Image (spheres, grey):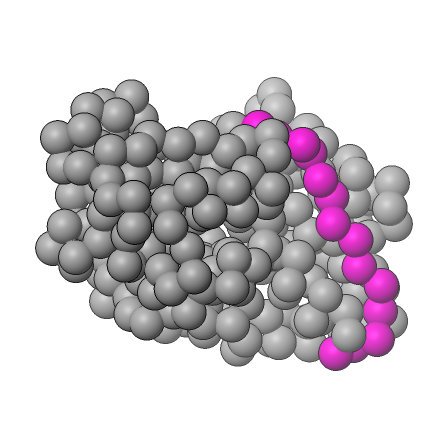
Amino acid sequence: MVPLSEVKSYCDERLKISSILDFENAFNGLQIENNGIVTKIAASVDAGLKPLELASKSKADFLICHHGLYWDSFIPIINHNYKKIKTAINQNIAVYSAHLPLDCHSEIGNNALLAKELKLEIIDQFLEYKGTQIALICSASGYNRTTLSESLKVLFPSTYSSILYGSENPKRIAILTGSGQSAIPELKAVNVDTLITGELRQHHYNMAQELELNLFPCGHYATETFGVKSLAEEIAQHFKIDWVFLNQDCTL
């Protein structure tokens, strides 16, 4: 058993929560407390009702999520919102959220871990948001467009997609997990024509043609499973407690 305050402090310091500004209504850090004791960690991409129910079934009392409970400035605690909050409180589950701090972390961030999975060397960062670079640039050494496609199909078998109008032999590959639309207009300025991301919108198909880009949208959910898993495993090892990943098989 570990005091909740110690687990919270570890996460806050490891992710530099206080120094990374996020989207206006994102709330990083401890969102719901429990009885003050942590015995098992659960990790999920989202803090939805189903993950909370799965956390309860797994006997976890600390849920780390990438997308937290609060994304609007005011949320009436009714209907599904009531059910989520009620489940967390009744089942004694503390909820901890880390959005951009877990995307851009140099060791346990979604971007960095995806680069590691693909054995890509990180050479730069770009796409500043409120003082933090939230996307990576990697050397394409060892890859051409075809072999990169093949590797991504293996890594993301259910969510892989591609829009291929860029170079067959890219020299630099950008990574922005989750939503990648903000990166598209910035790619050419950083000499990149190939982007691995989670999701895009229909008009990015036209932009790929017009700007001669290779775009690989491989699933918002799928590209953001890396960070929560890594953080949960690290906390569990540090405090010598168990952890579990709550997979929802989301294909979006």
Residue nearer the viewer, 190 or 69: 190
For the point 84% across and 75% down, which residue is it?
240
Residue nearer the viewer, 110 or 52: 110
For the point 59% across and 55% down, which residue is it?
226
- Residue 166 % position (x, y): 24, 40
- Residue 178 % position (x, y): 43, 43
Q: What are the residue bounds of the magenta stretch?
A: 238-251
For the point 29% across and 21% down, which residue is it?
202
Residue nearer the viewer, 122 or 30: 122
Quadrant (top left/top right/bottom left/bottom right) for the N terminus = bottom right
For the point 18% across and 37% down, which residue is it?
212
Residue 158 drawn above or below residue 16? above
Residue 15 drawn above or below residue 172? below
Q: Quadrant of residue 82?
A: top right
Q: Quadrant of residue 73?
A: top left
Residue 242 within the magenta-colored segment of the rendering: yes
Direction from residue 134 to residue 229 in the image, left or right: right
Residue 9 drawn above or below residue 153? below
- Residue 124 % position (x, y): 29, 70
- Residue 34 % position (x, y): 74, 56
